Image: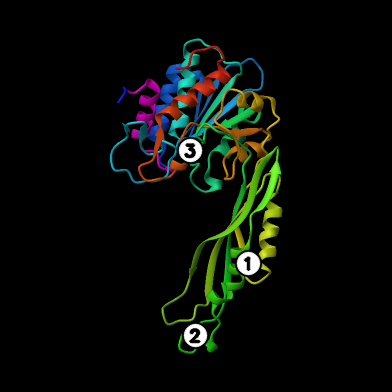
Amino acid sequence: MTAPTPLEETLLALCRIPSFTGEEGDLCDDVEARCVGFLGRDAVARDGHSLVVTAGASGRAPVVLAGHLDVVRTSHDAPPRIDGDRIYGPGAADMKSGLAVMLHLLEHLSRGERPVHDLVLVFYEREEGPYLENRLGDLLGRFAALRGASLAVCLEPSGNALQLGCMGSLHARVIFEGRTSHSARPWQGENAIHKAWPLLSRLAALQPRDHTLDGLLYREVMSCTLAEGGRGRNIIPDAFKLNVNSRFAPGVSIEEAEASLLALVEGEARVEVFDRSPSALPHRGHPLVRALESVGVAAVEPKQAWTDVARFAQAGVAAVNLGPGTQAQAHQRNEYTERASLARGLELFTRWLFPGVPCG
């Protein structure tokens, strides 16, 4: 095995610091110290366990690089390590590989190399939790430099593919109500689970609805993801709850997505929408997006899932997804990212932001 590169050593160091959602303090301390070492205290603002790092003050609208500090709880058979062509560790893919690239871009600045755009880097907490607890929304409200960006890049794992736009998402509790009775005499009750059958049949029959924007295909889908009901083995249930998740295309509003869900339920149950995440447009024609596409990204793809590009979109900032992490490894047991992908990610961002500067 070849010796770890400085970039790989940084990723391993980040993976060794636990940073589960809501427990990002130690990692924030480490990243803050690194950023202050590169740029000085005045360039680094801390807000809770999140950081906003400013590099450059030309007065032009900056480029924002965004990465979340938290990871989900996954199982690992060994400490963070390099094994062959892979780097293993909690968050190695999602998204400490992106954080490592962001830190090494700051190293260019510490050597006096100037990017073609002013930069603002945001390292934030609680991305993996509920939409309303994600701190990026707070930071967008408090730091004008984030809202005034010319483009934001979320370094979520994409295998160095440029992923444009994102699907919106909403979750709803769909509650069927019945009446209990003994299961030996079901005619004396009203089975709430059985009442859900027509809706479940309609959900099972739904086909994806295709939307094409900027030459990219987004597929709207709706699925039942959780079910809860029943009081006992011999009791006809009086309540049955489904969690229905709708994924809606860029350009479709939350209100339109809610209306589609209500139309599917057809008044057969009570609906409580409790988690709403907006979609985001792809912005493929944006000049900075075209420039990023030209540096050799692995592919240009639609983002079929939801990411924080939608938060930037809500603030009026065009945003895209591009990161070196291995996308399929996000949230997996023994999560890893490929060493070659990590190195390539830094190379792409260096070409885009520091043209002519050797990657390192």
In this rendering, position of residue 146 left or right of residue 18: right
**How many discs mark residues in the rendered view?**
3
Q: Secondary structure at mark 1?
A: helix
Q: Nearer the viewer, residue 124 or 98?
A: 98
Residue at point 40%, 23% (across, down): 7
Residue found at the far top of this picture = 112
Q: Is residue 145 visible?
A: yes
Quick check: marks 3 and 1 in contact, CB under 8 Å?
A: no
Q: Quadrant of the C terminus?
A: top left
Q: Position of residue 149 (x, y in %)?
A: 64, 27
Q: Secondary structure at mark 2?
A: loop
Could you say which disc has been placed on residue 202 in the image? 1
Say above or below: 107 vs 251.
above
Magenta span contains residue 54: no
* Mark 1 and mark 2: Cα distance apart in space: 28 Å
Q: Is residue 149 visible?
A: no
Query: Considering only order in the chain, which callout, 2 or 1, is on the residue closer to the N terminus?
Result: 2
Q: Nearer the viewer, residue 86 or 241?
A: 86
Please, what is the three-letter code of the amino acid marked with disc 3? Glu
In this rendering, position of residue 330 left or right of residue 246: left
Q: Which residue is mark 3?
A: 125
Give the magenta part as a residue range: 4-22
Residue found at the far left of this picture = 78
* Mark 3 and mark 1: Cα distance apart in space: 38 Å
Give the foreground label among 3 and 1.
Answer: 1
Q: Which residue is mark 2?
A: 181
